[in-house]
Amino acid sequence: MNIKPIHNEADYKAALKAVVPYFENEPEPGSAEGDFFEIMLALIDAYEAKAFPVDLPDPIEAINFRMEQLGMVPRDLQPMIGQINRVYEVLNGKRSLTIGMIRKLNSSLGIPAECLIRPSRASAVNRKADIVNMRRV
């Protein structure tokens, strides 16, 4: 049972190979094998977080995903966003979320606030198009 840091892909593959047998027959917590398994999982988790970071989803994608999960339609977002036209403006990336909307979406739908405060890709594209159109005038 050799424990060492995971610095590269080869170390990562070796660590995975070392813990695979423990998934089928998990060792007793607190035993030498149990401690080895726990430490190796922590090392693997740390390496994966660094080597394969997961970016937060786009706010509009997160809202749409949560709506799908809950079987909601845009009209169901009115208490959190406002009138139906404003809901569609937000969902189409024409309007950014306000702090109040973010708070309500977070508390009502459980969407993480750190995801909702990011600028959406759709609204960024729309802003660029508006700037280009303003230059043409």
Image (tube, rainbow, N blue to C red):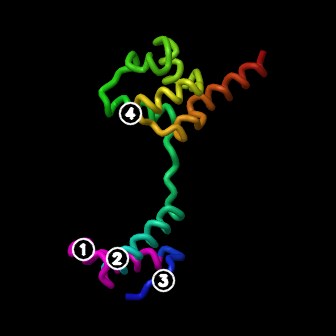
**28 left or right of 98 in image:** left
Instruction: Please tell me the numbered disc located at residue 4.
Output: 3
Left or right position of 71 against 133: left
Q: Which residue is mark 1?
A: 26
Front tag of 1 and 4: 1
Residue depth check, mark 3 versus mark 1: number of the one nearer the observer: 1
Mark 2 is surrounded, within 10 Å at the Cα level, by few (under 14), some (14 to 19) or many (20 or more) other residues, namely: many
- In terms of sequence position, does the residue under pointer 3 or pointer 2 come before the other? 3
| Closer-to-camera residue (127/38) | 38
Compared with 46, 76 (above or below) is: above
Amino acid tagged 2: Phe
How far is disc 4 from disc 2 in space, using C-alphas? 35 Å
Q: Position of residue 92 (x, y in %)?
A: 51, 23
Q: Nearer the N terminus, badge 3 or badge 1?
A: 3
Image coords of residue 105 (percent x, y): 47, 28
Percent x, y of residue 121: 57, 35
Disc 4 target residue = 66
Q: In this figure, which residue is indicated by the disc labeled 2?
A: 37
Q: Are marks 1 and 2 in contact (CB under 8 Å)?
A: yes
Q: Are marks 3 and 2 in contact (CB under 8 Å)?
A: no
